[in-house]
Image (cartoon, rainbow, N blue to C red):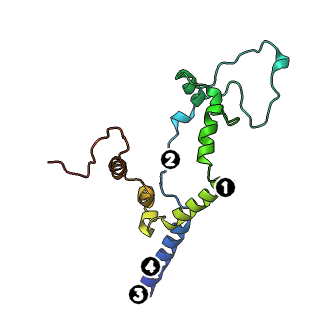
Amino acid sequence: MRGMVGIRIVALAGLTGLAACAGDGPQLMNIKDVTPDEFAILPTKPLEAPEDYTALPEPTPGGTNLVDPTPQADAVAALGGDPDRLQLGPIYAGEQTLIAYAGRYGVPADIRSTLAAEDLTWRRENNGRLLERLFNVNVYYSSYKPMSLDQHLELQRLRDRGVRTPSAPPDPQIKVE
């Protein structure tokens, strides 16, 4: 009888280990979205007949449609901005100086893939403990805590150097009597 209990315990431990290893990558947030997303449904714009059917652009597979909803561009236009600036394309004159200053030490061409690989390595190393993964505990904030900025410490550092800073709420960790 003891042998059967031992076999069951070993089998349960093996099954738990297999379940913990499942998945294609570390999931730090562990959010299960089983309900429909009502915000994903956007109404289309009303259909309009063009004045000249020969002036219509060539259809592109996977491209956008004239009646597709564009909530970001609509919000930018409603706030008085230029929705055309949301499209990736030419660098405007006002941005040239900023881009030149940001890239003054050189910019690696593969920076996005490098950062993605480094982040995947970081997430694999900080994926949480076995029971946290088993019970889908959110470990995102504890995993990235070493990389987070202490806003109150940074504000004090800037003020000590004489940098003019805006007012900010007090640090909730410091008790004021």
In 3D space, how far apart are the residues under numbered discs 2 and 3 (Cα atoms)? 42 Å
Residue type at mark 1? Pro
Q: Look at discs 4 and 3 and give the one toward the viewer.
A: 4
Q: Position of residue 72 (x, y in %)?
A: 57, 30
Residue type at mark 3? Arg
Residue placed at 81% from the left, 25% from the top?
57
Q: Is residue 54 left or right of residue 168?
A: right
Q: Look at discs 3 and 1 and give the one toward the viewer.
A: 1
Q: Which residue is mark 4?
A: 9
Q: Residue furthest front?
A: 162
Earlier sequence position, callout 2 versus callout 3: 3
Q: Position of residue 156 (x, y in %)?
A: 32, 49
Q: Which SS class for mark 4?
A: helix
Earlier sequence position, callout 2 versus callout 1: 2
What is the crowding at mark 3: few (fewer than 14 residues within 10 Å), some, or many (at least 20)? few
Residue placed at 62% from the left, 53% from the top?
105
Residue type at mark 4? Ile
Q: Which residue is mark 3?
A: 2
Q: Position of residue 52 (x, y in %)?
A: 82, 14
Disc 1 and disc 4 in contact, CB within 8 angstroms: no
In 3D space, how far apart are the residues under numbered discs 1 and 4 (Cα atoms)? 52 Å
Earlier sequence position, callout 1 versus callout 4: 4
